Image: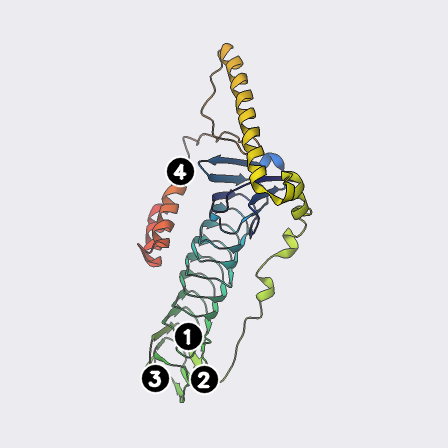
């Protein structure tokens, strides 16, 4: 296991690629801590204040909570928490867990997706497994392969799931909800809820037991205002629909949001190591930055001297980026027979357009599907 610590600005932008499992945690410290299973699996560089980190083994990052984080690819599971800036996430091979983040734009998740205590909009284009989200503003999920469970969201909810969908709303004035489910839909409302129901079922029944309505129908469509009316709640189910304020439901899976067992021993005594590693006298990060700058200049002079000696031996090095903490391996050339596919830059551009509200989640899904062809 290898651990590297460097000073970093609190508003730095960090790009991450990881072939295995990834954990990213925000902290109040102005330092970047990178821990990997194997030291030679890690490559990292800094270009004009932008940090690019790539790991072939499990990787844990602890960085300033105000940093902007972009996870381009993760081969295994990925989890992020305590981040104050909106995150952008490309492809996640396994499960994705988001805890206390300030909004997110996510391209694809191979497994399940868990979200807890989100601030700002969460936009998910494709999820292979199930979606569980507890606490947040608005959420948009255009393609969920399994079931979806949404609790305690105060803003617009838009979900398209292959299996059942369960939604629990706490506020009396129900937000706009648009849901399509391959199986059942269950909507749990508070008493005296205000909204306009627009229900369509291809299955067994439609039941409404809320805001004074007590209806059980075998018809496939039903519309009715609840309370004083309000935002539209459009539910389209492959099977039955139930809307009720007589029952209460809560998420009983909060403990599974963050995977402590896998990461709790991944790096020993982080806080003490940070202080010792940077040798910050009296907690002064400025002193550490000055020391790092001095060391960098000395290292640069030594590198230039070595290159001059190699030049005298007719050696011509290729282009080199600024190195941070350790050496950065040169990227391998692509195989001439490799299939041409969308570049990371193209996929990140689509997610950036989604984040800036220039396109919808559905439009993002169409663009990403077109790039994959």
In terms of sequence position, does the residue under pointer 2 or pointer 4 come before the other? 2
Q: Is residue 326 above or below residue 227?
A: above
Q: Can residue 264 be seen from the camera position used here?
A: yes
The location of residue 60, given as percent across then percent down, is 59, 46
Give the spatial CA distance, label 3 vs label 4.
57 Å
In terms of sequence position, does the residue under pointer 3 or pointer 4 come before the other? 3
The residue mark sitting in front, 2 or 4, is: 2
Please rate how many residues cluster around mark 1, counting C-alpha atoms within 10 Å: few if below 14, some from 14 to 19, many from 20: many
In terms of sequence position, does the residue under pointer 1 or pointer 3 come before the other? 3
Q: Which residue is tagged 4? A: 339
Q: Nearer the viewer, residue 149 or 47?
A: 47
Q: Which residue is tagged 2? A: 191
Q: Decide: marks 1, 4 in contact (CB < 8 A)?
A: no
In terms of sequence position, does the residue under pointer 1 or pointer 4 come before the other? 1
Q: Which residue is tagged 1? A: 239
Residue positioned 47% across, 72% down in the render:
166
The residue mark sitting in front, 1 or 3, is: 3
Please rate how many residues cluster around mark 2, counting C-alpha atoms within 10 Å: few if below 14, some from 14 to 19, many from 20: some
Q: Which residue is tagged 3? A: 228
């Amino acid at each position: 296991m290898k651990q590297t610590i460097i000073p970093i600005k609190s508003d730095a932008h960090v790009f991450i690629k990881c072939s295995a499992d990834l954990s990213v945690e925000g902290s109040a410290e102005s330092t970047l801590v990178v821990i990997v299973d194997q030291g030679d699996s890690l490559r990292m560089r800094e270009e004009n204040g932008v940090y690019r980190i790539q790991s072939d083994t499990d990787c844990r990052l602890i960085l300033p909570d105000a940093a902007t984080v972009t996870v381009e690819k993760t081969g295994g599971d990925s989890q992020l928490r305590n981040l104050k800036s909106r995150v952008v996430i490309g492809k996640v091979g396994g499960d994705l867990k988001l805890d206390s983040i300030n909004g997110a734009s996510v391209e694809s998740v191979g497994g399940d997706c868990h979200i807890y205590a989100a601030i700002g909009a969460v936009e998910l284009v494709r999820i292979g497994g199930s979606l569980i989200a507890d606490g947040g503003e608005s959420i948009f999920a255009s393609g969920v392969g399994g079931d979806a469970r949404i609790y305690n969201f105060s803003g617009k909810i838009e979900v398209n799931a292959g299996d059942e969908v369960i939604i629990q709303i706490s506020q009396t004035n129900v937000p706009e909800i648009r849901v399509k489910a391959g199986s059942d839909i269950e909507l749990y409302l508070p008493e005296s809820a205000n909204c306009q129901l627009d229900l369509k079922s291809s299955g067994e029944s439609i039941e409404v037991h809320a805001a004074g309505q007590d209806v059980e129908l075998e018809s496939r469509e039903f519309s009715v205002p609840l309370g004083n009316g309000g935002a539209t709640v459009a539910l389209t189910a492959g099977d039955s629909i139930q809307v009720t304020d007589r029952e209460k439901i809560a998420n009983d899976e909060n403990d599974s949001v963050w995977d402590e067992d896998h990461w709790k021993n991944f790096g020993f005594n982080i806080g003490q190591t940070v202080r010792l590693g940077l040798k910050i006298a009296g907690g002064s990060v400025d002193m550490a930055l000055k020391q790092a700058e001095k060391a960098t200049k000395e290292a640069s002079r030594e590198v230039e001297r070595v290159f001059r000696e190699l030049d005298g031996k007719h050696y011509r090095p290729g282009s080199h980026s600024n190195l941070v903490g350790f050496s950065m391996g040169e990227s391998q050339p692509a195989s001439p027979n490799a299939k041409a596919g969308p570049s990371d830059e193209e996929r990140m551009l689509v997610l950036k357009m989604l984040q800036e509200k220039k396109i919808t989640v559905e439009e993002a899904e169409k663009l990403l599907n077109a790039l994959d062809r």
